[in-house]
Amino acid sequence: MITAVLFDADGVVQRPSRDWLSPLSSLAPSDPDTFVAELMAAERPALVGKSDFRDAVAEVLQRWKSQASIEEALEPWHWFAAEPSVIDLIGKLRAAGIGCHLATNQQAYRRAIMQERGYGEWFDQTFYSCDLGLAKPDPAYFRAILGALQVPASAVLFIDDNEDNVAGARSVGLQAELYDLSAGVSALEHLLRRYGLPVAD
């Protein structure tokens, strides 16, 4: 019997609110693909709390001699929006006594934005990788969450849009399913019903 559900953020609870790749690419028109790849690489240590993301972005901009400000480069990390129907679904599960928790890889800069937008209120607990010092798909990430929840792994359902993350969760005994918002909220409801969770038809 499932007593707790872990929801990934990007692709499950939230989606981009506008195109972010083009604006980032425009900050280094000489070689946009490499520039964006370096920004993404610079984010990785921050995802597990080992660096400050603002400082990492500043270093990339300096290395590329970009004229963009740090704030301009960071702006795309603000461009996301939660899917209201999913938030409503989470609220109904919580009202029925099912623990609902956020399980997401984020650096502290974006975590602060998410918390300001209500994520701390929508979930019973929020497990950000930057706080745990561990990131999906590392099995240790899921073990840390299980330690905090104090529930059997078999009683936890994890939902993510990344196959590697799903595999990582299953490796420590969690029930885990692949889901992407592009499939529609009805597909998420169907998934939850398969696990006997209280979702209205």
Image (cartoon, rainbow, N blue to C red):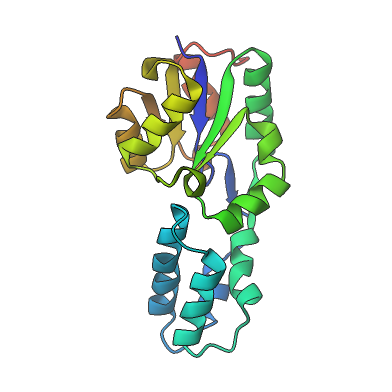
Q: Position of residue 31 (x, y in %)?
A: 41, 85
Q: Residue 121 in the image: x percent, y percent?
A: 71, 34
Quarter where residue 24 is shown: bottom right
Is residue 56 left or right of 100 when viewed as pictured?
left
Residue extending farthest left: 171
19 lies above or below 22: above
83 sits left or right of 142 in the view: right
Residue at 45% x, 15% y is: 195
* Closer-to-camera residue (81/120): 120
Give the camera-side residue of 160 and 144: 144
Residue at coordinates 43% horizontally, 68% vertically from top-left? 42
Q: Tell me: residue 25, above or below residue 135.
A: below
- Residue at coordinates 67% horizontally, 45% vertically from top-left? 115
Residue 153 coordinates in the image, percent (x, y): 38, 20
Describe residue 177's horizontal placement relative to residue 27 as left or right.
left
**Position of residue 66 measured from the top left corner of the image (x, y, whole percent):** 53, 87
Q: Quadrant of the C terminus?
A: top right
Q: Which of 142/33 is in front?
A: 142
